[in-house]
Image: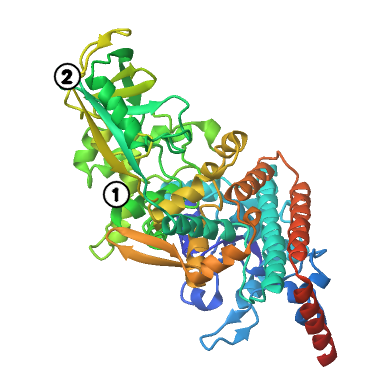
Amino acid sequence: MRIERLWIPEKPSVGKDIVQALIRTKRAKVLNAKSAATDGYFSLDTGDVVCPLFGHMLTMLPPAAYLTKEQNAGNYFEFLPLIPQPFKFEPKPDVDAKGKAHPPKRFNLIGELSKRAGQIVNACDIDREGQLIFDEMFLYWGLDPAGNRFLRAKITSKAETDLDRSVTALEKNGAEHWVRQRMAANARQVMDWLLGMNGSMAYQQLTGIKTMSVGRVQSPVLAMVVLRDLAIQTFKPQTYFVPVVTLADGTALRWEKRKDAAGTAGFDAAGRLIDKSLASGMVGAIKAGARGTVAVASTKVERESPPLPFSMGRLQATASKQHGLSVEQVTKAAQNLYEKHKAITYVGTDCEYLPSAMHADAGAVVAQLASVFPGKCAKADPGRKSRAFNDEKVDEHFAIIPTGLVPALSDAEYAERAVYETVVVRYLAQFYPAYEYEKTSLVVMYGPDEFRASARRDLVLGWRELEKPESTETEEAPANGPSRPLPKLEVGQQLAATGVSLETGQTKPPSRYDEASLMEDMISAYKFAKTERDRELLQETQGIGTSRTRGPILQNLLKRGFLLSTKKGKRHEITSTPFGKETIGRLPPWLTDVATTAKWELMLSAIALGEAEMQSVIESQIQYVKTVIERARMQVSPRQSAANEKGAGAAKKAA
């Protein structure tokens, strides 16, 4: 059988969609409709064959593949670091219900079909991992996936019109962009192996704990939870005091700060007033007639643009928080909405922006959504163009939005209905006006102490009619509430208080992580930077992990007993187990640093953008791994070293 064009999607569900698209665009007929499941592929009368994969078909071999039996049973420090040249791969075997391994039927089938194909189309997911899944097979077979035979389908939506466009507008799989994607994924693969395998073996040898595990992303994520739990465990509440001045019209001015007082006598590190006698002295002085001076008296109109559409990470965090779903439930629901219902665009994205050209489709999409969300769509103006439509922020990925194909979801599919509405509402927000409000600020100085009041008055609700903003620590809450106006005062004006009181508060421990907030912190890795320079640098990244890996990393930590997830109300609270705490306690802080891992993600992105060489990035990781091993080796005590030598000798003798 001569094959004109072999299509290789990443999943069977995508394969079926491609077959339907070829039937529509080429008026093709399936020749083996009855036997396709048994054959493992669809054969069409146009010479097209569609044969899907099951994700990665190759696996990197473990350290045992490079070690002698004696090395594997002895002292790891005798040969670490292990830097394979080259790395070894093998096809993943098929495993039956009884756990017995068999030769990889699908992998071998694709190899045979490829020999007979004139052209081969990479129809895997369009992220860097999808590119690697396809390319690595042909590299394993000694073929160049960037050669002229190889094409690339860019599937971003399962809606029929979008899918039809994807199967007709093919690109070269060897285009520079796709080659760089593969290189970035390959670098990620190698970096994970180098640190994960070497670090784990080193600390297994050092601690004697054979389940000790180190991971480039796994370890920092675990450390985030452990450190949060320890902060809660060791937290000691601190009483603080807040003098409150009342003006003649009833305005309450709350003590805010004393400039440069943080950490000095009477103030804690955050600048809170913790000395009651000092606070009482302030109150007494004001009662005795001390007058305040107006330092700020301003009223201005502020505008808040709609929040950007969702990347997968933001969707996981937001939908989990809004609907009480686990990250795993959100992920599965989103995948079903994309693959099964074709109701939303590609979910494996870390981008929150949209191509400008997609704005032309807004009217049709909103019109379709109006059949299910008439109230929300009524005020949406498809002619409005939000900041989300920005070609400079988009490469092969764009944000998750509805396709306009409205799914018929049953009550049993609660997670899918909830996630779908979350995506729709955020998309519709792009066609609502900005939220506008009038903000009045009043700052009055009583000597060196700043007292403050603020008020907010809504002018245009805009997108806030659709969704309430997520509360943040930085969002200012008006002390007098939004309904009480502040008096009109002039800067420099002297004020006398009509009353003054002293309020008492108590510091609270940080809240425990839940799945939503942990996902948010994985994305917002810049918050963990130790310098302002690093903070600015990391704000340009999507944090640690990717849209494809963050959920599985969390699930892996849960399944392996490092973390525990407990449902409390709508929250899926995350805590570290004793094993998780012990693991992080044994690892040095520099090996679990979130900011360091985020910098590595930045380097991987640089490879994909053509701004860094793959081999240079891998070489930097090799040097880092060597440092990891040397530092671990330095921690070995003489007693441990002797025990290791004895164990190694016994292993060699037994062998």
* Nearest the eye: 166 or 582: 582
| Residue 228 sits above or below residue 641 on the image | above
Q: Specify the quadrant that holds the N terminus.
A: bottom right
- Residue 144 is left or right of residue 600, and the answer is right
Position of residue 589 in the picture relative to residue 300 (left or right): right
Count of numbered circles in the view = 2
Q: Residues within 10 Å of mark 2 (few under 14, many from 20)?
A: some
Question: Type of residue at label 2?
Answer: Thr
Quadrant (top left, top right, bottom left, bottom right) of the C terminus: bottom right
Q: Is residue 108 above or below residue 575?
A: below
Residue 244, position in %: x, y? Answer: 25, 28
Q: Which mark is residue 498?
A: 2
Badge 2 or badge 1: first in the primary sequence: 1
Look at the numbered disc 1 and give the secondary structure of its residue.
helix
On screen, residue 73 versus residue 32, left or right, reads right
- The answer to whether residue 433 is visible is no
Give the crowd class for mark 1: few <14, some 14-19, many >=20 residues within 10 Å. some
Q: Position of residue 640 (x, y in %)?
A: 75, 75
Outermost residue to the bottom: 654
Residue 352 rendering spot, x and y as whole percentages: 46, 40
Q: Which mark is residue 421?
A: 1
Q: Callout 1, which amino acid? A: Glu
In depth, the one of 162 and 338 nearer the eye is 338
Which residue occupies 78% across, 53% down?
623
Helix, strand or loop at disc 2?
Answer: loop
Q: Nearer the viewer, residue 575 or 50?
A: 575
